[in-house]
Image: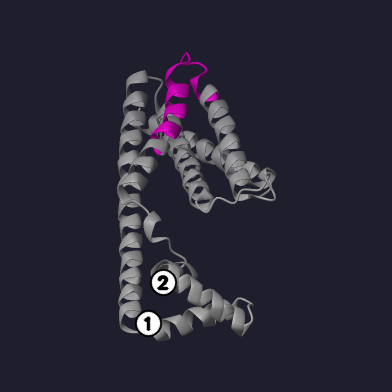
Amino acid sequence: MNPHPGEPHDTGLSGRLNRLRAGVLGANDGIVSTAGLVIGVAGATTATGPIATAGVAGLVAGAVSMALGEYVSVSSQRDTERALLDKERDELARFPEQELEELAALYEAKGLSPDTAGLVARELTERDAFAAHADIELHLDPAELASPGQAAVASAVSFTAGSLLPLGAILLPPPGIRVAATFLVVLLALAATGYLSARLGGARPGRAVARLVLGGAAGMAVTYGVGTLAGAAVG
């Protein structure tokens, strides 16, 4: 029974929050990168075709790049975690007494008395020695290792979702207001993602929102200026 029902005690909560936070950051990447691309092209031309082509190409390239990068990164992490778990499993099979002493020492280092640490170590070892060592020594749950495929899909989806906002904002309004509309939509979206990421991390949202909004505004202003200069030079 949870004595504090308002507080989460789910052991998988931290992992889910990390995945949600990664999704928010992926969407933010999609918003910023695609907005900069389409705003830059809009500075060079008012034609819808080139803007749409650049935006869609940026969306696809960014989603693929994010997915591949996440897949490689999580695969490397998973390989390392599996190697550590295999080593721990081998040590438990070869040196059970030494591993029991090590487990007791780890709990004693956390503040338990030697007698209590020894009792906890013995009871956990009798129940599941491998899980006990994976938890206290490696801080891993063998049943919940990160999935490279899931991470890649989540990254691509979040980036695509973020990219659709500036892409729609630049294509749907009339040419005369499309740049201003995109600025507004993107800044509102960045404020929302900044607020959400800060709340998920337990931080104050004000600074996170200000950083994203000011950074996004500066980035779009720069790309629009560069696009305008490039369009004038080419034209």
Which span of residues is magenta-colored?
159-180
Q: Is residue 133 in sight in this rendering?
A: no
Is 155 placed left or right of 218 in the picture? left
Query: Residue flagged by tag 1: what amino acid is it?
Result: Pro
First-in-chain label (2 vs 1): 1
Label 2, label 1: how far apart the Cα atoms are: 9 Å
**Is label 2 in a helix, a strand or a loop?**
helix
Residue 141 position within the rendered picture, expressed as x and y whole percent measured from the top left: 42, 60
Residue carrying label 2 = 129
Relative to the observer, which residue lies in front, 91 or 62?
Answer: 91
Picture residue at 35% right of the left edge, 50% below the top: 70
What main secondary structure does the magenta stretch of the protein show? helix
Residue carrying label 1 = 96
Residue 178 position within the rendered picture, expressed as x and y whole percent measured from the top left: 49, 20
Relative to the observer, which residue lies in front, 132 or 225?
Answer: 132
**Residue found at the very far top of the displayed protein:** 174
Discs 2, 1 touching: Cβ within 8 Å: yes
